[in-house]
Structure formats: structure tokens, C-alpha cells
Image: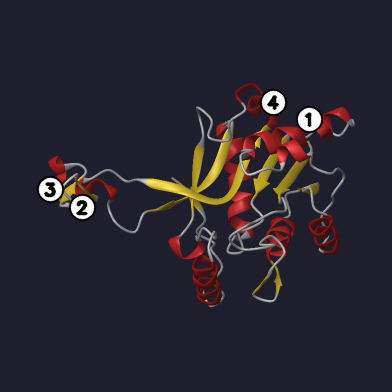
Amino acid sequence: MRVVAIIPARAGSKRIPDKNIKIFAGLPMIAHSIRAAQKSGVFDRIIVSTDSDAIMEVAKRFGAEVPFRRPAELADDHTGTDAVIIHALNWLAEHDQPARYACCIYATAPLIRPEYISRGLEVMREHEATSVFSVATYPYPIFRSLKLNDRGRVEMVWPENLSKRSQDLPDVFHDAGQFYWCDVEKYQREKRLLSSDALPILIPRYLVQDIDTPEDWEFAEKLFAVAGQMPDSSDARDL
């Protein structure tokens, strides 16, 4: 059984230049993802898919492999994650190094913890799922969301929920943007990490932050400082 981590990390970030290798809490951003993968202890290989010489150098310095350069047509602003992962898996198969299980780990997930990564593999194998990925809860019930109508006035998106108690509304989650496990054979048929039988790993909100703007970056650094004072997440669980 060959278990592979694939970390997509292209050049060309516009809102935060060189985001993937910009220093975050003392390390290049991508190094946090590489180290979490290493500490999880479940991978035979940790591969970075990139089109950048600078990212290649940093990735190798922290112990990841960069066995190929990502093609330019898969390194633009419109290419989705699935296309990048499928390219990497196909490259491995074509070079007689096929993966049995693969985990896409985002390069901009500095709050990621290794115990959640390893739990994802356990859940996928236990339930024979096509994919498993990290999710988090919303901080407020989205079914009581508000919007502005065409007159600029506030109204509920779902007015039928006005009188409902929060505890009577269904639980709703969002993609935590950290890791995505897949059973490679099943995934190659469906070609979607959000597969038809995907399972979740619940991540606490203090470990989740999308980083697209300088404000996001600053807030993530504050979360990182707080998370460092929290105990290890031995309660990592699926839903």
C-alpha cells in the first residue's frame, strides 16, 4: 500500500505575493503543511506540485519531494484542485509509482494538525469511502441569514426560520480547506474530492482560517498563537 501526500503550491498569488513561501510564524507557509504531513506518520511520500523554482527549493529544504514541474496549463487562476491532483496521480502511475491512497494538503493551512490527517485515513479505510476531508462548523446558524432586498432593506433569506430556535435548525458545515483524502482507484472514476460518498473530519474553528487577504493572514497568525497554547487535539473525530 502506497500512501502519498500531494501539496499543490503554484506561483502567482496576487493578493498576498509569494503566499506559499512567505514567512508565517517563523517558517515559510508551505513548511507548516509539510511538517504536519511528516508528523502524521502515515505517508510513504510527500510531494509538492508546483510551477515555481522558488517553491521547489523551499519544499525540498523541508523534506518534501518535487519529482515533476506542474504544467503551465494547470497553474493558472482557473485550474481547480481536482485537475492538479489527478495530474500528480497520473504522473505517479505513468512512472510505476502508483498511489493506493492520496491526501491533498493545502500549502496555506498553517493551523493543520497531524492527528486530524491520520484520522482522515483511518475513517476512509474503515468506511471504504471515496474521499474524506476536513470540515468546520459555522459560528452562527446560516439558516437565519439576512440579505438586502432590492429596496436596500434587511430581510431573512429563509423567513420560515424566524421563530425557530437555533437548536432546532440542522447542523451545517463548511470545507475547512486543510486536507482531502481519497481512495485513488475510486477517485479516478469520479474525479471529485467532494465525492458522492464523502465523509467529514470535524476540525475546531480555532484551527480553521482561509488566507486570501492580508487581514486573513494577520488573523491566522493570532489563531496560530492561541492554538499553540491549546492541548493536542486527541479528540479528533469524524461526524
Which residue has dot 3 on it?
162
In front of the other: label 3 or label 2?
3
Nearer the N terminus, badge 1 or badge 4? 1
Number of marks in the rendered image: 4
Which residue has dot 1 on it?
90
> Which x, y percent locates residue 219?
49, 71
Q: Do the residues labelled 2 and 4 touch (CB within 8 Å)?
A: no
* Residue at (19% x, 41% y) in the render: 158
Type of the residue with mark 4: Glu
Type of the residue with mark 2: Ser
In front of the other: label 1 or label 4?
1
Which residue has dot 2 on it?
166
> SS class of the residue under badge 1?
helix
Which residue has dot 4 on it?
185
**Distance of label 1 from label 4 (alpha carbons):** 11 Å
In front of the other: label 2 or label 1?
1
> Which x, y percent locates residue 40?
69, 56
Q: Do the residues labelled 3 and 4 touch (CB within 8 Å)?
A: no
In front of the other: label 3 or label 4?
3
Image quadrant of residue 131? top right
